[in-house]
Amino acid sequence: MVVPSTPSTYKLPNDFLWGFATASFQIEGSTDVGGRGKSIWDDFSKIPGKTLDGRDGDVATDSYNRWQEDLDLLVSYGVKSYRFSLSWSRIIPLGGRNDPVSEEGIKFYSDLIDALLARGITPFVTLYHWDLPQALHDRYLGWLNKDEIVQDYVRYSRVCFERFGDRVKHWLTMNEPWCISILGYGRGVFAPGRSSDRMRSPEGDSSTEPWIAGHSVILSHAYTVKLYREEFKEKQGGQIGITLNGDWAMPYDDSPANIEAAQHALDVAIGWFADPIYLGRYPAYMKEMLGDRLPTFTEEELKVVSGSSDFYGMNTYTTNLCKAGGDDEFQGNVEYTFTRPDGTQLGTQAHCAWLQDYPEGFRDLLNYLYKRYRKPIYVTENGFAVKDEDKMPVEEALQDHDRVQYYRGVTESLIKAVNDDGVDVRAYFAWSLLDNFEWADGYITRFGVTYVDYETQKRYPKESAKFICKWFKEHITVEQEPATLEDTKPA
Ligand code: GBH
């Protein structure tokens, strides 16, 4: 008899939320419709060389027009929740605290939220997924100007709480501050594309700007959470937190230097944001590495930052083998590889160079985060891009075996972390509902569980969508809650 590796008694809690995630700029298109102001990605994606295929976000998956169709898809998948982001410049076209609110922008999201709720789908809303209003960059360089951006971001959040908070009970302030800071202001591969590399950008200073931007992101997040807790939480009853990207870091071998390197990688990828927010201080290694290039919090700021997330929002995709050395501060002066000392690969290679399938790392990361930060974990993104899917005819792309394998491994790791390791995981969102605008990769890299034909905008469910839906339905009991001890106590 074959013993199943996951005993059938393993379950996720009844109220476990699962579904798919998207982000406004990656799916909406219609960038000049409905009074929307420009975001920093509008023009950036049009600069030759910034996206792999030279294509921009003007149409994307046309979800501004096709949102009802996307909703039907979610219903057909039977999800419990949908994670999406709000476009700041649709809601406040010029972005600033004294700029007018666009009722058309509000209506777009308000209708979407109503429609989700009418179908029993819980909206999980990200306030900021990288599409900063262009006007704020033009006025004061966006995240580089702490005093301005904190106020503008907090006011934007206030508008969202006021207008949507009666119906939205799950808020994410920021998506992946590391990416905002490092890719936007260090490597310069994401908007606004600033970097010391003059081949890439006419201006920027990669040695200081990313750390300044990150500091502003933390404070903007924290002051928004303070606002929510003081003025909205009591009457609206929601939860609010941040979501961080971070891949598991595994020592290349068991040499002390490489073991230390793996911790350094985690300190910079995750601890940079998570340590101040959950533990009340920047990691010691960040200070050691950056000296006075790392901004400091005032005592008052630190009080606001510390404890400013109700949960740990986890975006994760892969595992990196870590070797001490190199001079890439953005990964903690650690070298990443997928090639083991014996020459074998860690896992199946995805379409993008930075991603291989290694499900054990997912479980290890959950354990690490839960032990270190002691918060319930919401997995807000996780996914895989099949190699050369863009070159396949639709029928072939729909048989996305490598993506199914990936989700099979990760869901197994998830349920073991919950049942065997006692990690408190409360949600899982696969990235992404649809193939979409994959930032600097343009439309070449496809992360969707639904195939999008960019000629016709037709959507086709892939095998992976079917796998995920079936798996969650099998592992979450939807019947009535089992009787509690209280219920069975004799009177
Ligand atoms: C997520 O980031 C994003 O939230 C989502 O919008 C995106 O579509 C999804 O990933 C898939 O990419 O080689 O220096 O450019 C995931 C975290 C961290 C993954 C940075 C890519 C590339 C580093 N990302 N990493 S670099």
Image: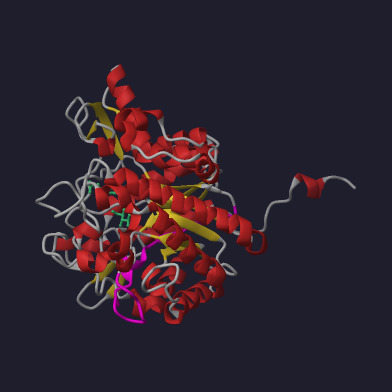
- 134 on left or right of 310: left
Identity of the residue drawn at 17% across and 29% down: 343
The segment highlighted magenta reads 14-38
Q: Which secondary structure dominates the residues rendered in magenta?
A: loop
User: Seen from this angle, which residue lies furthest top?
Assistant: 256
Residue 36 lies in the magenta stretch: yes
- 246 on left or right of 385: right
Identity of the residue drawn at 57% across and 69% down: 167
Does residue 97 show up? Answer: yes
Q: Quadrant of residue 327?
A: top left
Instruction: Return the x and y of residue 82 as percentages of the image width and height.
Output: 46, 64
> Which is more toward the observer, 364 or 9?
364
Instruction: Return the x and y of residue 157 as percentages of the image width and height.
Output: 49, 63
Instruction: Return the x and y of residue 259 as percentages of the image width and height.
Output: 32, 23
- 297 on left or right of 487: left
Question: Quick check: 326 above or below 22?
Answer: above
Instruction: Return the x and y of residue 188 as percentages of the image width and height.
Output: 20, 51
